[in-house]
Amino acid sequence: MKKIKSIATLVIHAGDQVDRGNNAIFPPITTASSFIQPNLGEEGEFCYSRCSNPTRYAYETALAELEGGVYATATASGMAATALILELLPKDSHVLVMKGVYGGTYRLFERLRKQTSGTTFSYVDLNDLAAVNSHIQENTRLIWIETPTNPLLELVDIAAVCQVAKSKGIMTCVDNTFASAWNQRPLTLGADIVMLSTSKYIGGHSDLIGGAVITNVQDIAEQLDFCKTTVGAIASPFDAYLALRGMKTLDVRMARQCSNALKIAQFLELHPKVLDVHYPGLESHPQHQLCKKQMRSGGAVVSIRLKGDITEVKTFIAKLNYFVLAESLGGVESMVNHSASMSHGSMSKEEKENIGIYDTTLRLSIGIEDINDLIEDAEQALSFIQ
């Protein structure tokens, strides 16, 4: 088979999606927990669905090729994927983490793994390579890169950090949820592992919970496969089916959503009732050049800070017609998320403000609606703010 390079073609044809039973054009949902074996010592391709399942296999091989990896495992959620990666680390390891990391990741690191495995975490600006080098310890086993970050969309120079990590023999993982392979492929920039919450852009329709871990390093792939089978936090056949179906339209969805996001950001940047706009696709963004270097676009999320207080925030949200208030992001519908009480609700007020999240911070996940309708909706809602 010819090597596919275009993302638009990969999202449709990547991986091994052949239905060996009936040659169906799309892999069917195989719900069986076990698979019949002809005799002792004569195992077929599949034996038990915790280990491998035909529907999940089709999806995982497609994801692996999409991200430029040799292996992918689909998990029950993005947090299950993050937890699985931590299983690769020996007890009492140290992890270097990008500051401003997603609140759920911070909760897992600080309130669970620190207590249960002795793992310690240091949070630094990974773009400050001097700080990166100074925080590396003898037991540092992983650098956790989130780029763009949630919700303030700070970027990390993936290639630069991975170069430092490789010189020290440290594994790297990039949370690629906000960008997706459509915008950037971290494995091609030197990362060892990619983590995804596939509930977002891979699924794309707000109808599944899932995660994935992808690597292009064979040794890591073997370790992940052992950990996945042992822990068992796998994606169900139905969720794998939904995610694979959603992946087919990733290219056309992301093209519309990222284009819409840039126009929304440009509109909000000039609005007198908006204090700050965070969007790396804007020329005014301090990391715009890095965005141009490693991303295809600025992404499909725009984060803002409104002028005023929580009263103005509530008024703005109440007056929106097309943006729905909801957890998560990445669906075809536009969403608004109150970061302080939703995505980062598990953090203290001080912790949130230390990374720039306030009661007036809102994360906008831009959908595929008509851009004029979205701008008009935001404009009329803002008009009600004093």
Image: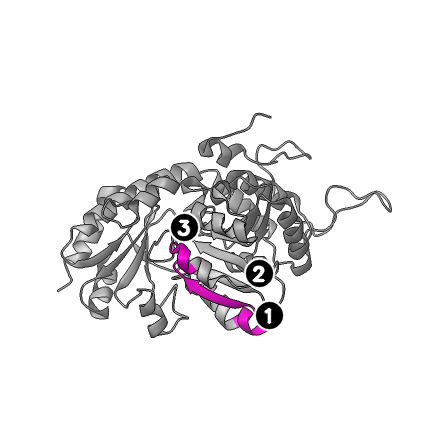
User: What residue do we see at 58% from left, 32% from top?
Assistant: 25
Q: Secondary structure at mark 2?
A: helix
Which one is nearer the viewer's eye here, 230 or 166? 166
Q: Secondary structure at mark 1?
A: loop
Q: Quadrant of the N terminus?
A: top right
x, y percent for residue 377:
22, 51
* For the residues bearing labels 2 and 3, Cβ distance under 8 angstroms: no
286 with respect to 236 (left or right): left
Where 208 sits versus 93, above or below?
Answer: above
The mark closer to the camera, 2 or 3, is 2
Q: Quadrant of residue 152?
A: bottom left
**CA gap, disc 3 to disc 1?**
28 Å
Residue beneath disc 1: 117
**CA gap, disc 2 to disc 1?**
10 Å
Q: Which residues are magenta?
A: 112-131
Residue beneath disc 2: 86
The answer to whether any part of residue 282 appears in the image is yes
x, y percent for residue 228:
64, 55
Which one is nearer the viewer's eye here, 47 or 130? 130
* For the residues bearing labels 2 and 1, Cβ distance under 8 angstroms: yes
Of the numbered discs in the image, which one, if any, rests on residue 178?
Answer: 3
Three-letter code for the amino acid on which mark 1 is drawn:
Ser
